[in-house]
Amino acid sequence: MENLGTLTLKLNRITLRKFYLEDAFFMFKNWANSSKVTKYLRWKPHQTEEQTKDVINSWVKNYKEQNFYQWAIVLNKINQPIGSITAIIKENETAHIGYCLGEKWWGKGIATETLKGVIDFLFEKVKVNRIESQHEPENIASGKVMQKCGLKYEQTLKQTDFNNLGKCDAVVYGLLKEEYIKA
């Protein structure tokens, strides 16, 4: 494995890049303050832009670490962040991916383009062996994004997770590098 850190990834309609403190306004406005976006997430909607700045500041400090992957999803035509995607690298060469997107951009294929771009980067450049992600059973749209990107359903773990609704199941999807290469 070759950890490279959060490099800029240019995709079709979007650019994935590091967050900057100046992104706090758009992050707060476009998704971080939304109870709809955070409904199935572990963090509460932000109450102030200052709270969003604090989160971004913690990410900025971690960018010096080569195993830290936290991207702003920037829609090229408006040149502003509309969501985020992160990959947590585990010791067994597995990347666990999580993402969120402002509701204004749901259903437009942006989450699929973003996840696919990160999957390609992690398998081809970082050389992970496995990519996994999970969603809350009620968040069917997130599962569809995972499926469109080639991740395969593996299992549903009962009450193993939590989100803003409380305890929840985790629907787990995964993809091995050998499966990615064959596809």
Image (tube, rainbow, N blue to C red):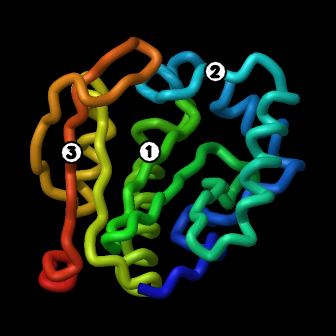
Mark carried by residue 172 = 3
Crowdedness near tag 1: few (<14), some (14–19) or many (≥20) residues, C-alpha within 10 Å: few
User: Percent x, y for residue 50?
Assistant: 87, 29
Q: Which residue is tagged 2?
A: 45
Query: Height in image: 125 above or below 49?
Result: below
Task: Find numbered disc 1 in the image and state the secondary structure of the residue it sits on.
Answer: loop
Mark 3, other Cα within 10 Å: few <14 / some 14–19 / many ≥20:
many
Q: Residue at x 62, y 76 (%)?
A: 66
Instruction: Count neighbours of disc 2 (C-alpha within 10 A) and say few if under 14, some if 14 to 19, many if 20 or more.
Output: many
> Which one is earlier in the sequence, the residue at label 2 or at label 3?
2
In the image, residue 160 above or below residue 130: above
Residue drawn at the location 35% of the way across and 77% of the way down: 128
Location of residue 30 by image quarter: top right
In front of the other: 155 or 103: 155
Looking at the picture, does residue 138 appear above or below residue 90? above
- The span from disc 2 to disc 3 (Cα, nearest Å) is 24 Å
To which residue does mark 1 refer? Answer: 108
> Judging from the image, what secondary structure is the residue with disc 2 in?
loop
Residue 53 at what x, y percent from top left?
A: 84, 38
